[in-house]
Image (spheres, rainbow, N blue to C red):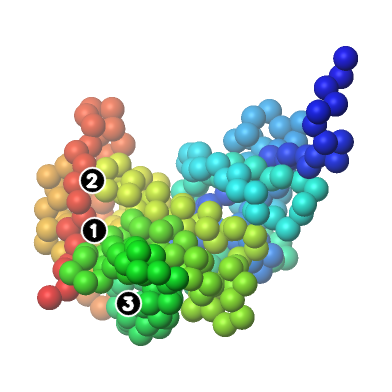
Amino acid sequence: MPDTSAPQDAATVAAELIAVIVAVTGGEPRVLTIEGGHALPSGPFEFGHRSLQAGLRSWVERQTHHPLGYVEQLYTFADRDRTDSVAERVVSISYLGLTREARMAREPGAGWLSWYRFFPWEDCRGDAAGIAGEQLVPALRSWADAGPDAASRRDRRHRLAVNFGLDEQRWNEELVLQRYELLWEAGLVPEAGANVGVPGLPMAHDHRRILATGIARLRAKIKYRPVVFELMPPSFTLLQLQRAVEALAGRLLHKQNFRRLIDQQDLVEETGEMANETGGRPAKLFRFRREILAERAVIGTKLPLVRAV
C-alpha cells in the first residue's frame, strides 16, 4: 500500500549549481558575476548533466562564455529560507574556481567585479581599512548593547570582538563568513531586510553568503597550498606575486619576509627575462615550478603580514 502519511502538497527539492569564480587583475581580487553583479553564475542540476562539475561548467560557460580551469567543491547550502519559494526547497552545491580574467564576450549582465565591492570592510590594505571602525563597529556595538538580557549582550560583544579584531583581539582575515553573518544577524545588510544597510553591494538570495564562504576558503588555502599560482600569468615578477597574495588576503605583506618565504620553499624559478615595471627599474621574471608539487608537500606557513603598530 502507498504511504499516505506524508502531506500531498509537500514541497519539492531541487539541486542548484553555483560558482564562485575568482581572478586577480591589476592587484584586485575579482569575481565573475551575472545579472549586473547581483548574482553568481548558477543553474539547476539537470538530468542531462554527466556530473555535478560538468553541469556547473555548462552553466558558467552558457551564462558568461568563460571557460573554467581549476575548480573544487566549496560547500552545500540547504537552509530552508534560501529562496522566497514555499513550493520548492533548493539545495545549492557551490564550487570555487580559480582562473585568469579574460576579455568578456558581449553577454548582457555578465562581468567581473572586485569582491571588495561586496565586502569593502574586508580590504585592510589601505584607506578602506577604516570602513569597519567608522561605519560597521558603532552600529554593531549598538546592536550588541540592545540584547534582551545580560547573557545575550555578553555573547554579542564577545563575537563582535573576535570577528572584528576588537578589545585586544587580532583581526583574522579568514573570518569573512562570520563577519557577514554577524552583520546579517544585526539586520545591517539588505539581505536581512535592512532599509539602510552598511556599505557593500547586496546580492540575490544568499549569493553574498556563498561568496563570503569562497573568499574565506581561498584566504585559508593560500597559507598551505600554492593555489595563488593558478591566478598568475605564465611569467611574473615577485612584486606582482606579492600584490596578488595581498589582494586575496586583504592585508599588506612584509616584502623581505615574503621573498624569503618564496625562496625557502623553492616555488619559483627565473625565466631569464626581464620586465619593465612602471616607475622602476627592470625586474626579473619568474615562473611557478609545478614539479615542486610532485617532489614534496609544500610546507604550510602563516603569511608574513605587516602588523599595525
* Amino acid type at mark 3: Ala
Q: Secondary structure at mark 3?
A: helix
Q: Please name the residue that numbered disc 3 is placed on.
A: 129
Above or below, 251 against 11 in this view is below
**Sequence order check, earlier mark of 3 and 1:** 3
Residue 239 pos. (x, y %): 25, 63
Circles 2 and 3, Cβ within 8 Å, touching? The answer is no
> Count the marks: how many?
3
Residue under numbered circle 1 = 238
- Badge 1 amino acid: Leu
Q: Quadrant of residue 308?
A: bottom left
Counting from the top left corner in percent of width and height, residue 61 is at 66, 48
The dot on residue 268 is 2
The answer for how far apart the CA atoms under marks 3 and 1 are is 25 Å
Kind of residue indicated by mark 2:
Val
Residue at point 41% right, 59% down? 178
Q: How many neighbours does mark 3 have within 10 angstroms: few (below 14), some (14-19), or many (20 or more)?
A: some
Q: Camera-side residue: 136 or 252? A: 136
Q: Earlier in the sequence, mark 1 or mark 2?
A: 1
Number of the front mark, 3 or 1: 3
Q: Is residue 218 visible?
A: yes
Q: Residues within 10 Å of mark 1 (few under 14, many from 20)?
A: some
